[in-house]
Each structure stands twice: as C-alpha cells, then as structure tokens.
Amino acid sequence: MNSVNNPSFSNNRLINWFKLSSPSTFYPVAGKLIPIFWLLTAVFGVAGLWVSFFVAPVDAVQGQGYRIIFIHVPASWMSMFIYLVMAAWAGLGLIFNTRLSAMMAQALAPIGAWMAFLSLWTGAFWGKPMWGTWWVWDARLTSELILLFLYLGFIALQASIDNVRRADKAGAILALVGVVNIPIIYFSVKWWNTLHQGASVSLTKSPAMAQTMLWGMLLMALCFWMYSIAVGLMRVRAIILEREAHTDWVRQLDEVKN
Amino acid sequence: MSALFTIIHRDLLLVMRRKSEVLTALFFFVVVTSLFPLGIGADATLLRKIAPGVLWVAALLSTLLGLHRMFAADYQDGALEQLALAPQSMVLLVTGKIIAHWLVCGLPLVLLAPLIGIQFDLDANSLYVLMLTLLLGTPVLSLLGSIGAALTLGVRGGSVLMSLLILPLYIPVLIFGAGAVYANSVGLDISGHFSLLGALLILALAFIPWVSAAAVKIAIE
C-alpha cells in the first residue's frame, strides 16, 4: 500500500487531521495502523489473560467462576462505548456531511453488536452458577438486550436502503435516537435495585476488588479496545474500497490492480 | 396553527374514506387479545395477572400496523414533497400527522381496553388504571413510531424493518404502562409509574416531531 497516489500524506510529518477525513488519505494510513493495533491486541490480550487466569486470586464468594468478568466487563464497556462513538461519527456525518464519518459509523456497528452479544452471552454463563439462572428480566440485562436490538436495527436499516447517502443519514438519525439507552444501561444498577451487582470499578472511589483482579480487567479492556480499533479500521478500509470503487485512486491501488 | 388542524382534518378525512385499514388494526387488537385466554386456558387468576401485559403488547402491535400509513401514501403520490415545500414548518405538519395517527390508532385502543379488560376479569379499579396508562402511553407510541415510519419510507421490506427499529424503543413504555396496572393490582403505589409515563410523553412531544421531520426530509431529498 505504499504506491498509493497520494503525495500529500507521505512527506508530511505534521499530520493534518482534516486531511485524514478524506477516504483517499485515510485508507493508506489505516492500512499502516492496522498491524500496530493487532500487535497491541495480542500483547494486552496475553498479559491480560495471564493475569486473569494465573495471577488474580480466587474470589472468596464466587470461586473460580468469577473469572468470566475478565471478558464480560470489557465486552459490556465496549458495547456501550462503541455505540457512543458510532453515534458521534454518525452525528458528525449528518452535520458536516463528511463521507468518512458515515463509513466509520457503518464499520463500527457490527463490532458493537458483537460486543453486546458477547456481553449477554458471557453474562448468561456468569448468571447460571452465581444466580442459578441463565437470564433474569433485570433492568441492566434488558437494557443491554435493547442495545443489541438497536445495533441490529441500525445495521438492517443501512443495509436495506440502496441510496448510500440516504442510508447514512437515516442510520445516523436512528443511532442518535438510540443514544438515550446508554445512560439507562450504565445507571440501571444504581436506579433500580435488581439482581445485577453494582459497578465494581469507578473513577471516583477506590475499586471494590483486589488489585490484581483490577489489573487483569484493565488489561483485558485495553485488549478489547485495540481489537475493536483494529477490526474497525479493517472494516472501514473495506467499506472505502466498496464505496469509492469508481474513483481513480482506488483503481491505482496495488491490491485492486492485482 | 391552522395548518396543523388542516393536516389533522385532511388525514382524518382520508381515513374515513377508507375505513377498512383502521378497522383492521382495531380488529387485530381484539383478536390478538382474545387469543390469549384460548391459548393459555381460562384460569381467571392467571388471566388477571397477564391482562396488563397482553393488552399492552397487543396495543403496541396494532399501533405498528397503522404506522406505515402515516407517510407512505403521501410519499408515493408526491403529497409529502408538496407538504415539505409548504411555507409552514415541517415539524408542525409532522406533528399534525402524528396527532391524526393517534386519534385513529391510539384513542380507539384506549376506549376499547376496558371492554377487553372485562374479558380478562379485571376489576373496575384496574380497568381505570389501564385506561389511564394507555391514554398516556399510546401518544408516545405514535410519536416514536413516526420516526420509524419516516426512516423506512420507500424502503424494501419497510414494514418489517420498521418493527425491528421501533419495537425496542417501545420497551420503556410497555414496562411502565403494564407495570402500573400490575402494581395497582397488588396494592403498590403507582404514582411513580405515572410520573415516568408522563415524563416519556413530555420528552417525546418535545423532541420527536423534530427528529421525524428531519427523517422525512432525508427520505424525500
């Protein structure tokens, strides 16, 4: 991807962020960043799994089964955070009419849906030994399920509108309407006293868990971040190729020519 | 303001010219609710317990049936574009269409609910609470539904897609609406449920007409 017809970026040390908003500039940059983020995913993943399986102590109450949180909590965080990022990109696209923002939103949606699914799935595996049931109609579980539906709705809406510009804008409106759900999920354990336990990690008070457990969780969260960014960049590159297939710069790419 | 009434009047007139569509949605509501006692069995205690949920879910579904009519016909014959070109703000016109939809698809459900409720052996107090929750909740359903109706204008498989988009957004209304009737039947305080339903209605009234107007504009661009 070095022979991209794009001199503006290669000899420019000071990155001009606005230039990156053009798909033709962003495409090669994303290509360079993807291996870095995969490497970071692997590093944080190995470290996080090692800490969470071998270093972190067995929980006094919940036994070995608690180790699911090292996947469950990062996945839940990501599912909410990706939705916010997706809605922000979609909103940017709606306001400034930038092509790349809408592509970003479209690229993030399946990752977020996957995270929401993972969060529910691991949550069910947690719930069976701890609560004795796979599923309860608790406020947090229900709102996370709604989040999954919102992701699926966004994907379905974008997929069924043929006109790309209209699909982007319609999706953006839906994404922005759905943002209402995020604070509801996040604060549901505070607002309603239900089965799901309260947050173990918070910015304002010291965490209610052992130091090593916290480290394992944070490392896994970083791993999920890097994974999401890497996959997001890969997906957005594919979307760029698909949408810009008619342009000259895409035709001159090595991977397209061969 | 007169534009608002004109739109409402026009939409109601169109509905009156073709009554079958509205009656279908109402009939659907009655049939679906009547299926539950047949499927579950005529145990009066059980029926009393599930009645609020069944009535609310049936109300959600039958509102959904009428939604595609809100903009689709006007979109196809070009009337929607003419409305967008009108000097009055699109928000006002969309609000008019939402009110017309509620008068046709929401209000009859509120009036029918006690009749169905009796079939489920609800007492007078529960019926009263059920009607009040539907009165507060069905406008929210029409408002939220207008977003889906506008977003899926002219889209392949639009009505199925619309249910996928809108039903998740309906969940809070369902929870608090059916929850109020249930809480009342077990003797709990229901003012909280009503406050939340009222809050949902106020928020929806304040924001959704703008969102729907934007969505309509995107569709006819």
Image (cartoon, coloured by chain):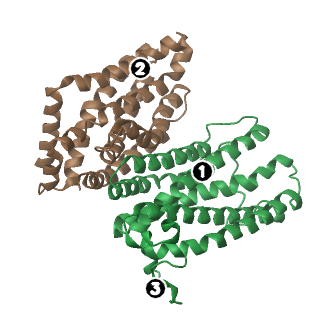
* Figure chain in brown: B
Q: Is residue A50 visible?
A: yes
Q: Could you tell me the amino acid type at mark 1? A: Trp
Name the chain under label 3.
A
Does residue B146 appear to the left or right of A255 in the view shown? left
Quarter that holds the N terminus of chain A? bottom right
Look at 40% across and 52% down and name the residue there. A174
Q: Quadrant of residue B90?
A: bottom left
- Can you identify the residue that label 2 sits on? B32
Local packing at callout 3 (Cα closer than 10 Å; few below 14, some 14-19, many 20+) is few
Mark 3 lies on a secondary structure that is helix
Image coords of residue A5 (percent x, y): 45, 79
Q: Could you tell me the amino acid type at mark 3? A: Pro
Look at 16% across and 50% down and name the residue there. B81
From the viewer's side, name the closer residue of B213 and A17: A17
- Can you identify the residue that label 3 sits on? A7
Image coords of residue B175 (percent x, y): 50, 37
Mark 1 lies on a secondary structure that is helix
* Figure chain in green: A
